[in-house]
Image (spheres, helix red, strand yellow):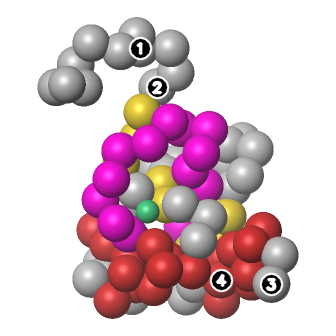
Amino acid sequence: MSGRTHARVCPERTCVGCRERAAKTELLRTVEIEGECVPDPRGTLPGRGAYVHPALVCLDQAVRRRAFPRALRVPGPLDVMALRRYVEQAQGC
Ligand SMILES: [Zn+2]
C-alpha cells in the first residue's frame, strides 16, 4: 500500500507539530495576529494559516521547533496562550 491510490476527497494539510499529513478538517487552522498565534476553527480569518492537530502534543512540538513563526512567515516568537487554551478545551481535559 503506497497510499497514493486513495481518492482525494478533501484537501490535506501538514500538521506543523508532528509533520503528518491530515485532512484539513481534522486540523486546526491558526493565524498570527499582532504577535499572537490565535485559533481559527472556522477558517475565516485572513492571512497565512498554519495547521496543527488540536492536540497538546502537536502544539508543544510545534512550539519547541518554532514551527509557527516559520509557517506563518513572521520573524519573532509567537504567543500561543490563546491557542493552548483552545486546544485544552477542545481536548476536553
Ligand atoms: Zn500533529
| Relative depth, front residue between 74 and 82 | 82
* Residue sitting at x 35%, y 44%: 21
**Outermost residue, front direction?**
1
* Residue sitting at x 78%, y 68%: 90
> Which residue was labeled with disc 1?
8
Element marked by disc 3: loop
* Residue sitting at x 53%, y 60%: 53
Number of the label disc, if any, that sits on residue 84: 4
3 or 4: tag closer to the N-terminus: 4
> Which residue was labeled with disc 2?
11
4 or 1: tag closer to the N-terminus: 1
Element marked by disc 4: helix
- Please tell me in which quadrant of the rendered image residue 81 appears: bottom right
Decide: few, some or many residues near mark 2? Use Cα within 10 Å; few <14, some 14-19, many ≥20.
few
44 vs 20: above or below: above
**Image quadrant containing the N terminus:** top left
Confirm or deny contact between disc 2 and disc 1 (CB under 8 A).
yes
Q: CA distance from mark 2 to mark 4?
A: 25 Å
Nearest to viewer (mark 3 / mark 4): 3
Nearest to viewer (mark 3 / mark 2): 3
Element marked by disc 2: loop
The magenta region covers 17-33
Answer whether residue 44 is magenta in the image: no
> Which residue was labeled with disc 3?
93
At label 1, which amino acid type do we have?
Arg
- Residue 32 visible in the picture: yes
At label 4, which amino acid type do we have?
Arg
